[in-house]
Image: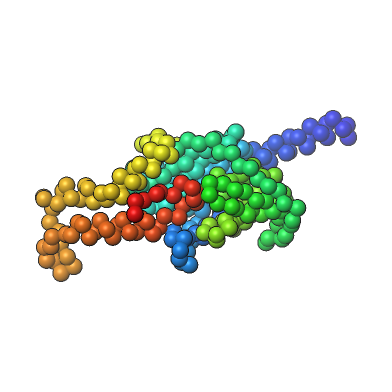
């Protein structure tokens, strides 16, 4: 066979494979409280199409799949793991908070250190890489057995697919569970049309304002609302004590994946 024709065939098949769509399922194990040994598990989904990816919880994925426009109420409290990554290191991160969704646009630069060390994870031959990013040091294991250059959250730009990743404190662990090929075209548009564009600094202010007075809306409605205890008896809520409880919880569960962006609550 003519070498030029063979090269064109190989280029065609390579291009066809790289533009296919994939769904990758990851298990996320993380600590909401960095001082506790207790962990939380979440099933995460990474959708990949060419140089784009979308990382979200399984619950958020089901909402998106309904093509309902992305109901905020159905994903509130499902943590802030929704990231859409575009070409040239552009990422959009979504934060679900109370009754709003906030959207941060960021150009993410990841400076990976490739380590000449290998090991087998499941059926994949993996190579090691180290990354320092926003207050955490990450150890990642990626495979070149598959022509997919992607990973969980905003972690990508390695010469392969991230199979396992963990930060040095053991607060966050991502473990690849399965890979599925998809035939449909993935929608990387904003499913949450009502998302509020905001900067990191502005988002910090949103959290601090809530911390200062987390029961503001409830207190404003208290004059025309009856509060009933478990026995059906009308009671007067102790808003001061409730506020202290909420503030204590916010301080305790303040261990975000981007550690340098943890909210600096007042003492």
Q: Is residue 176 visible?
A: no
Q: With respect to residue 182, does 43 lie above or below?
A: below
- 267 sits left or right of 108 in the view: left
Kindly identify the residue that appears in the image at 84 percent across and 30 percent down: 4
Residue lying furthest bottom: 231
Picture coordinates of residue 123, whole percent (x, y): 70, 60
Kindly identify the residue that appears in the image at 23 percent across and 51 percent down: 215
- 258 sits left or right of 1 in the view: left
Kindly identify the residue that appears in the image at 43 percent across and 61 percent down: 33
Residue closest to the eye, 135 or 125: 135
Q: Quadrant of residue 85?
A: top right
**Which quadrant of the rendered structure holds the C terminus?**
bottom left
Residue lying furthest top: 4
- 226 sits left or right of 149 in the view: left
- 94 sits left or right of 229 in the view: right
Residue closest to the eye, 187 or 264: 264
Q: With respect to residue 5, does 253 lie above or below?
A: below
Picture coordinates of residue 253, whole percent (x, y): 40, 57
Q: Quadrant of residue 250?
A: bottom left
Picture coordinates of residue 124, whole percent (x, y): 70, 57
Kindly identify the residue that appears in the image at 45 percent across and 65 percent down: 36
Q: Is residue 90 visible?
A: yes
Picture coordinates of residue 137, whole percent (x, y): 59, 52
Number of numbered tags placed on the structure image: 0
**Which quadrant of the rendered structure holds the N terminus?**
top right
* Colouring style: rainbow
Residue closest to the eye, 155 or 169: 169
Q: With respect to residue 143, does 104 lie above or below?
A: above
């Amino acid at each position: 066979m003519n070498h030029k024709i063979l090269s064109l065939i190989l280029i065609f098949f390579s291009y066809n494979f790289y533009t296919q769509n994939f769904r990758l399922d990851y298990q996320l194990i993380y600590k909401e409280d960095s001082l506790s040994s207790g962990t939380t598990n979440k099933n995460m989904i990474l959708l990949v199409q060419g140089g784009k990816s979308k990382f979200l919880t399984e619950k958020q994925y089901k909402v998106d799949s309904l093509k309902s426009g992305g109901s905020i109420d159905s994903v509130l409290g499902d943590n802030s793991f929704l990231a859409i990554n575009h070409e040239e290191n552009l990422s959009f991160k979504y934060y679900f908070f109370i009754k709003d969704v906030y959207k941060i646009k960021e150009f993410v630069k990841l400076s990976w250190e490739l380590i000449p060390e290998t090991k087998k994870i499941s059926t994949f031959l993996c190579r090691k890489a180290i990354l320092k990013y926003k207050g955490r040091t990450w150890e990642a294991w990626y495979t070149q057995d598959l022509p997919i250059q992607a990973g969980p959250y905003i972690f990508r730009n390695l010469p392969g697919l991230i199979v396992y990743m963990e930060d040095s404190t053991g607060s966050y662990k991502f473990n690849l569970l399965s890979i599925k090929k998809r035939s449909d075209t993935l929608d990387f548009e904003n499913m949450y049309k009502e998302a509020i564009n905001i900067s990191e600094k502005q988002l910090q202010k949103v959290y601090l304002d809530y911390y200062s007075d987390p029961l503001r809306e409830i207190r404003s409605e208290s004059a025309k609302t009856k509060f009933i205890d478990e026995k059906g008896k009308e009671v007067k809520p102790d808003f001061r004590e409730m506020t202290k409880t909420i503030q204590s919880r916010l301080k305790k569960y303040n261990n975000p994946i981007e550690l340098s962006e943890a909210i600096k609550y007042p003492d």
